[in-house]
Image: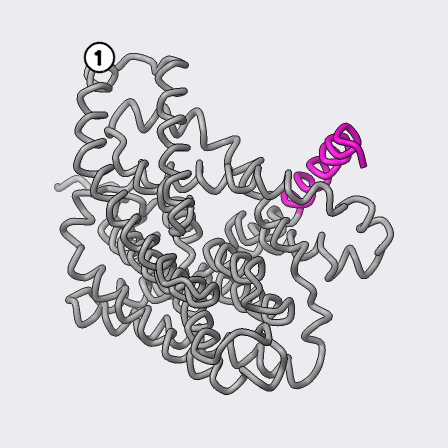
Amino acid sequence: MTNHETVTLFFLQLAVILVAVRLVGLLARRIGQPQVVGEMIAGVLLGPSLFGALAPVAQANLFRPETRSVMYALSQIGLVLYMFLIGAELNVGLVRNKLRSAAAVSLAGIATPFALGCALAFGMRDSHALFAPQVQLWEAMLFTGAAMCITAFPMLARIIFERGLAGSSLGTLALAAGSIDDVTAWCLLAVVLASFGNDAGVALTAIGGGILYGAVVLLLVRPLLARLLAPINQQDTTMSGAVLGGILALLMLGAWFTDSVGIYAVFGAFIMGIAMPRGVITRALHWFIEPLTTNFLLPLFFIYSGLNTQLSLVFSPTLLGVTALVILAATAGKFVACWAAARLSGEGQRESLAIGSLMNARGLMELILLNVGLEHGVITPTMFTIMVLMAIATTLMATPMFEWVYGRYQRAAQLIAAEPVPAST
């Protein structure tokens, strides 16, 4: 295909993708799931698992390999912009207050599913062709453990935002714990990729570069931005195109650096978002960036992942059993560990159950990690499909579990608080 033909086909792809994610997202919301869950499912439906099975010629002609790189690039821009917005909306003061509890919840939520993932990889390494032949046992264990312990930070943030908990104590604790959780999981992945390439410098560069980046942005760039952008916040003026362009350039520079050192671009974006001055600046950024990002760019990543998911690969009794075991271990390990850690940190029973439910969502970050593993030849398409099913299942569980243990009580409390007080006689 020529470049012109590739671009022309990509426009048609975009139209199909946007219609599909809207329709499936609408169905997801009808059953109490957030829009992002519908987008995950739409990705699988448009891939070889359904569309490719029902109309293989049409699916192959629509999603040609030549357009994959364009879709991937746009999806990465969407991820970066979305994580930037999440960082810009994070209440840093509440994070400081909840740091001890967040660290405890994160550590427990990492250690338990990580150990279960290592145990599963130890038992599955040589039996079902789930890992590339050249992958060592300990590398398979480390990758599976990292994939099991990760929390979908953007998914977590989206649930918290949609439930109106973004600035609450519970929401901030969950966000802080989720961010620590994911940074640790990506450091583990960096170790796997370093060992797979026989280069320990990859892991050292990733971890050291990530620490350096965080220190520079939060200690130097953040106060500098506060001074430079103070007139806009203080005078409550509109953000100009030049200021928006400068902020976006700085964001892309941060994404480039963290991606180049191996931590992944979304964490550079998240830290840069934290560095943004609160007030008019963050409100304007949300107004300018959020609609296009969540409704156009971000769904492309779910479609890209769905094109790599082939459910037919696990349609055997043995592999279906493996998939069920992976889902059970991932769900129980994360939920129980985070609930127990929150309780031991002094959180209430209902809040602790809610945190365990929220931390169990793996959606977006899980798919990112799995795509990296597949691209680097660590896992096979079969293992990719199993872990995608685990990501969808645990993410589907997160909202109903949260609603059952916390959401209904939250709404009841809000209704009681809103009732007028009867006049005294």
Residue 16 on the magenta span:
yes
Vertical side of 349 occupied by 363: above or below: above
The residue pinned by badge 1 equals: 235
Query: Residue 389 falls in which quadrant of the image?
Result: bottom right
Residue 84 in view in this figure: yes
Query: Residue 112 falls in which quadrant of the image?
Result: bottom left
Q: Main secondary structure of the magenta part?
A: helix
User: Residue drawn at (38%, 33%), measured in percent from left and top?
Assistant: 253
Vertical side of 347 occupied by 55: above or below: above
**Image check: 116 left or right of 396?**
left
> Residue flagged by tag 1: what amino acid is it?
Gln
Residue 281 on the magenta span:
no
User: Residue drawn at (32%, 36%), measured in percent from left and top?
Assistant: 273
Q: Magenta residues, as a range?
A: 1-23
Quadrant location, the N terminus: top right
Q: Position of residue 190 (x, y in %)?
A: 39, 60
User: Residue drawn at (35%, 25%), measured in percent from left and top?
Assistant: 247
Vertical side of 348 occupied by 22: above or below: above
